[in-house]
Image (tube, grey):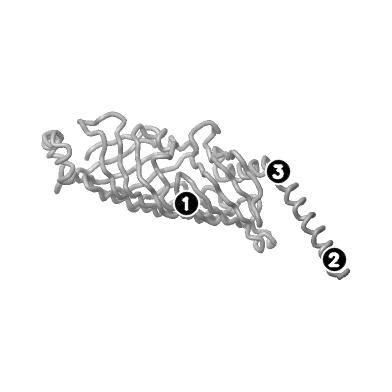
Amino acid sequence: MAFAAKNKKWLGYTLYVVLVTLALLYYLFPAQAVEEFVSNSLSRINPELGFKADKIEPWIPAGLRINTGRIYLSDPASPAVFKAGSMHIRPQILKLMRGEYSIDLSGTAYKGDINGLLHSKDKNGETFTGDVSFKDLDLGDYEFLTEKIPHRVTGRISGAIQYNKNSAGAAGENGKADLRLSGGQLQFQAPIFGISSVDLQNIDLEMQLSNLEITISKADLAGSEVKGSMTGSIQLQSDINLSQLNLKGTLEPLAEFYKKHPDIRNLLKSMKKRMKRGQYFFAITGTVGEPRFRLL
């Protein structure tokens, strides 16, 4: 009896110490230091990138929970390059013991789900790999895109992004992305030739990153009104607005497009010389900040 009572006593002390430790960990958690660490890690990828969060707190059994985390370009008050609603980050303890920095992440962003793995073999981030997948992100909530183009794009985007960086610097950066936009629609800021919106329906996109150049190997549009395709490259600059565009593609209006917009038929007839096999060929040049579109 005395032995059992003594065990209960020690168990009570142990639980008390654990609870006090957890309470201190919660209230004394160095959220600002964590925020600065994440921000500094991003700046190693791109000096223009920064990070802010509404709240960072410990997450049991081992990890962090970030509420409304924002990755921004230059100005924290500007629309976020990426904004997560709630994100859980868990370090892989065994790799950490070997001197490698590897974390699993999961959470929500733009009303969709996101999961991934980030890994670095050194604390300075000179070598880094990232593999992130996401599902049903609401593109209509993506403020950064809204600021960059005058028209509104809606729909849900799913896919995966892989990124690798080695100690060679910019020359050692490479990656790829496979994306799919579902239920998409392009809404013009002001009607163009009487057209206020175009149904995009589905867009499949495949692209690769190598030496600061994004190569778009596939961009296929399958809409009920228009179908098309595009390939080309984007030469990246430290200021994303100055990145050079070199894209070419085709657009083919379908029967539904003419049915919904009968007044446009005469205009398109006047452009017959630009049409080949029912398709219009186009090029997009200039920069991300000031793109130039022309028919070929």
Which is more toward the observer, 100 or 217?
A: 100
Residue position for label 1: 113
Q: Amino acid at mark 1?
A: Asp
Q: Residues within 10 Å of mark 3 (few under 14, many from 20)?
A: few
The mark nearer the N terminus, 1 or 2, is 2
Mark 2 vs mark 3: in front: 2
Report x, y in % for residue 152. 35, 36
Instruction: Give 3 or 101, whichever is nearer the viewer.
Output: 3
Q: Which residue is mark 3?
A: 30
Q: Secondary structure at mark 1?
A: strand
Image quadrant containing the C terminus: top left
Look at 35% across and 39% down and name the residue there.
153
Amino acid type at image mark 2:
Ala
Identify the residue under disc 2: 5
Image quadrant where residue 247 sits: top left
Expressed as whole percent of the image width and height from the top left, the position of residue 83 reads 50, 42
Gap between marks 2 and 3 measured at Cα: 39 Å
Callout 3, which amino acid? Pro
